[in-house]
Amino acid sequence: MLVSKFLKREDGAVTVDWFVLTASVVGLALVVVVGLSDGMETSSAQLGGDIAAAAADANPG
């Protein structure tokens, strides 16, 4: 009787589904952030250099 009730309940399965879904979303977000970080670092360094050059051109003294 107790075993049949346990086998019919689906609460644990829903929890596992949410856990897997959440872990997948977090993993995908990490992959995106890591993938974009190198390009963003390069772009921001280039932009900083461009701004410094423009500031030096604007204030030649």
Image (tube, helix red, strand yellow):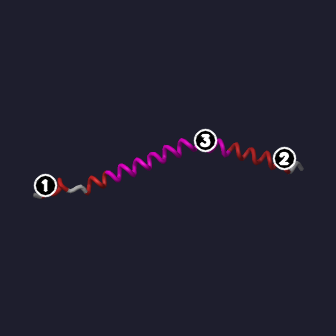
Residue 24 image offset from top left, x and y in percent: 40, 47
Part of the protein shown in magenta: 17-44
* Residue 25 among magenta residues: yes
Residue where numbered disc 1 is placed: 4
Q: Are marks 1 and 2 in contact (CB under 8 Å)?
A: no
Residue where numbered disc 3 is placed: 39
- Which numbered disc, 1 or 3, marks the residue that appears first in the sequence? 1
Residue 8 is left or right of residue 32, and the answer is left
Residue at 66% x, 46% y is 44
Residue at 17% x, 56% y is 6
Residue where numbered disc 2 is placed: 57
Residue 21 is left or right of residue 61, and the answer is left
Please name whichever residue, 46 or 9, is drawn nearer the observer in this view of the structure: 9
Give the CA separation, mark 2 to mark 3.
27 Å
Residue 4 is left or right of residue 23, and the answer is left
Residue 55 image offset from top left, x and y in percent: 81, 50
Q: Secondary structure at mark 2?
A: helix
Give the CA separation, mark 1 to mark 3.
56 Å
Residue at 83% x, 47% y is 56
